[in-house]
Image (cartoon, helix red, strand yellow):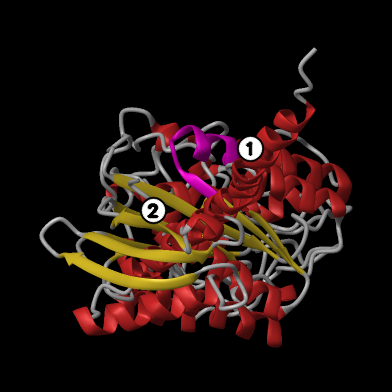
């Protein structure tokens, strides 16, 4: 028998080196694949960053991209970056950033392969769709002091980011400050959609005999309509139903807080009832008492109208910034009426007509809704059942309930908030929500559910967190999608 053990040992020694190279080479190749993944991430970040800065020159863009690549692929990572290129295609709004990474080999160098070079190129198409954004912001009394200042600061930051390098024809922002109701602006006095002929049955809700609110305003000698409006009847209260004189329920109401009784627990008595006896409801609804009368104290029929006017969609940054700067903190919280008017600001139809048609593929419609507290309307142990608000008195059931209980009223307002948010989402609006120093877990849960998805809800326990939330929203709206 021939002894072949020496041959086997010889063959094994011959094959050992290729086997080692193949095994070790897999390690080198794996390192190269990891480096390519990291390179791709760094170039993606650089391309997005350059894309946002639409005013950069070629040299500035290259320097800007290098900073992002270096930050996202530091020298401590495996591989050496080289060959960075940045291409700006102004005609098609495309940014392309490319580079390579050279990875020194450990095992493949034994067979003369000293390094492996991987290449990557990231291309982004600048977002060319239009953006229409409504900021629906809580301006209630609890927002006083530093909180309203922080809100103004954060809202200004959002507009600054969005308007940076933006085409004003493709960006419009509107503002809806809200409290117990909203203010559309006195320039719309007796507008056809504000029911100048008192066709809506709600017009005479607090007047006996029936009266036209506009005429009542005219007879009061020292108070005019302050621009606020009331909610329409459910379901039109939260919906974008087109106003029509042929359907009086769809017309809007000028806000009119009635003179309340001088007897009992009533917070808004501003003129003589001109009636004897103790029938409080009759005294309050006595329409003739307004003729030629003057308001003795307070805001009179404007009591509860505390919010600054809505700013319709505009591409003028100074206009929206002026509206933000003018915001004040006063009044109680009525979130559903704020959300409903955010929808109307984005709507193409009356009362505001600056929005493009619903469903336009090249337009993003978005809404930011912020509150710092729970829905609230003060219940009263009197014949009105509550203070006056955008939903009138609770005695009349315009919120879907007849109750003086604070919790019952809040639950009804929460239900309308949930319905208003659902309606906004159904219209295709991208809804972001923010709670600012809100202690109520039920309110935080409601606002999270209000958002288009949970990731678009931000709980902000501090002013810094609020600013971060607005910055992240601005970044999301400005975000550019990778085309490959």
Depth check, mark 2 against mark 1: the one in front is 1
Residue 271 among those drawn in magenta? no
Q: Residue at x 69, y 80 (%)?
A: 464
The reply, left or right, for residue 285 in relation to residue 212 is: right
Give percent across and percent down for residue 199. 39, 37
Q: Is residue 426 found inside the magenta-colored segment of the image?
A: yes
Crowding near the residue tagged with mark 1, few <14, some 14–19, many ≥20 C-alpha atoms within 10 Å:
few
Q: Where residue 15 is drawn, which disc sits there?
A: 1
Kindly report the distance in space between the C-alpha atoms of the residues bearing marks 2 and 1: 76 Å
Residue 59 found in image quarter: bottom left
Contact between labelled residues 1 and 2, with CB atoms less than 8 Å apart: no
Secondary element under disc 2, as helix, strand or loop, is: helix
> Residue 6 at what x, y percent from top left?
75, 32
Q: Toward the viewer: 360 or 354?
A: 360
In the picture, measured across the screen, residue 399 lies left or right of residue 174, that is: right
Q: Is residue 44 above or below residue 196?
A: below
Check the picture and name the quadrant holding the N terminus. top right
> Which residue is painted at 80% across and 45% down in the image?
409
Q: Left or right: where does residue 279 sit relative to residue 391?
A: right
Residue under the image location 44 percent in, 69 percent down = 309
User: Start and end of the magenta stretch?
Assistant: 420-431
Q: Nearer the viewer, residue 70 or 129?
A: 70
């Amino acid at each position: 028998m021939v002894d072949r053990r020496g041959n086997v040992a010889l063959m094994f020694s011959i094959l050992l080196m290729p086997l080692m190279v193949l095994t070790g080479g897999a390690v080198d190749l794996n390192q190269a694949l990891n480096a390519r993944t990291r390179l791709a991430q760094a170039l993606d970040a650089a391309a997005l960053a350059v894309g946002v800065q639409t005013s950069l020159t070629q040299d500035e863009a290259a320097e800007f991209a290098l900073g992002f690549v270096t930050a996202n692929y530091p020298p401590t990572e495996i591989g050496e970056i080289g060959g960075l290129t940045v291409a700006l295609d102004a005609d098609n709004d495309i940014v392309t950033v490319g580079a390579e990474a050279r990875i020194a080999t450990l095992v493949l160098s034994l067979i003369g392969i000293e390094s492996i070079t991987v290449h990557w190129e990231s291309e982004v198409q600048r977002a060319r769709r239009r953006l229409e954004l409504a900021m629906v912001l809580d301006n209630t009394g609890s927002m006083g002091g530093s909180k309203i200042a922080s809100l103004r600061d954060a809202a200004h930051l959002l507009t600054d980011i969005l308007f940076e390098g933006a085409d004003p024809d493709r960006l419009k922002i509107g503002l809806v400050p809200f409290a117990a109701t909203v203010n559309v602006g006195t320039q719309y006095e007796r507008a056809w959609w504000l029911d100048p002929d008192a066709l809506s049955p709600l017009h005479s809700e607090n007047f006996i005999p029936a009266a036209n609110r506009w005429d009542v305003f005219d007879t009061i000698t020292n108070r005019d309509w302050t621009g606020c409006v009331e909610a329409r009847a459910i379901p039109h209260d939260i919906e974008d139903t087109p106003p029509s004189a042929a359907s009086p329920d769809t017309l809007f109401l000028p806000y009119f807080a009635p003179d309340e009784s001088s007897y009992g627990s009533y917070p808004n008595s501003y003129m003589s009832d001109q009636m004897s006896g103790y029938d409080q409801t009759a005294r309050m609804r006595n329409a003739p008492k307004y003729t030629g009368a003057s308001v003795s104290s307070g805001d009179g029929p404007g009591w509860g109208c505390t919010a600054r006017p809505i700013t319709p969609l505009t591409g003028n940054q100074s206009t929206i910034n002026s509206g933000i700067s003018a915001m004040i903190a006063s009044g109680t919280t009525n979130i559903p009426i704020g959300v409903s008017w955010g929808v109307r600001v984005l709507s193409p139809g009356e009362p505001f007509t600056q929005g493009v048609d619903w469903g336009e593929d090249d337009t993003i419609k978005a809404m930011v809704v912020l509150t710092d507290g729970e829905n609230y309307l003060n219940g009263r142990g009197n014949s009105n059942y509550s203070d006056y608000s955008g939903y009138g008195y609770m005695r009349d059931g315009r919120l879907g309930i007849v109750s003086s209980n604070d919790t019952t009223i809040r639950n009804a307002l929460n239900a309308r908030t949930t319905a208003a948010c659902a309606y906004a989402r159904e219209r295709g609006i991208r809804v972001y929500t923010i709670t600012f120093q809100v202690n109520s877990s039920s309110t935080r849960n409601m606002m999270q559910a209000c958002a288009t998805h949970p990731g678009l809800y931000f709980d902000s326990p501090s002013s810094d967190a609020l600013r971060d939330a607005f910055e992240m929203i601005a970044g999301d709206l400005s975000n550019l999608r990778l085309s490959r």
